[in-house]
Amino acid sequence: MSPDTSAAEWIGYAAATLTTLSFVPQAWHTFSTRDVRGISLGMYSAFTLGVALWLVYGVLLDARPVIIANAITLALATTILVMKLVLGRRGGG
């Protein structure tokens, strides 16, 4: 970050870091156990679409904290959603 980074952008980075990191334990648990039974397909579908839209919003505004956080969260959420779809058919969720 450059020296002219505004206080608002620093707050954005802090918020992005906290919200993205808060999602990691759930993702890690799902990746390691491959247990998707407790995951709602409807909720995760809506969540993943919402994160994708936040990413587009961030790109349109050129808001780096929004772009970075939502790109990472979208990758994690999409992976979990795909796991739910694939493993759910196999009886794992």
Image (tube, grey):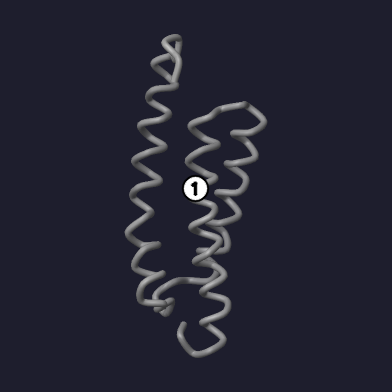
- Work out whether 19 lies above or below 5: below
Q: Position of residue 84 (x, y in %)?
A: 52, 74
Label 1 sits on a secondary structure element that is helix
In the current view of this chain or complex, which residue is farthest to the top? 4
- Which part of the image, by quadrant, shows the N terminus? top left
**Front residue (pair 72, 66):** 72
Quarter residue 2 falls in:
top left
Q: Position of residue 29 (x, y in %)?
A: 34, 68
Amino acid beneath label 1: Ile
Quarter residue 42 falls in:
bottom right
Circle 1 Cα neighbour tier, 10 Å, few/some/many (<14 / 14–19 / ≥20): some
Q: Identify the residue position indicated by label 1 in the image.
A: 72
In the current view of this chain or complex, which residue is farthest to the front? 2
Residue found at x 57% / y 79%: 86
Q: Where is residue 92 in the image (x, y as percent from the top left)?
A: 46, 85
Residue found at x 48% / y 57%: 76
**Front residue (pair 13, 51):** 13
Residue found at x 38% / y 25%: 11
- Work out whether 55 lies above or below 47: above
- Work out whether 87 lies above or below 19: below
- Work out whether 62 lies above or below 87: above
Q: Position of residue 80 (x, y in %)?
A: 49, 66
Residue found at x 54% / y 52%: 74
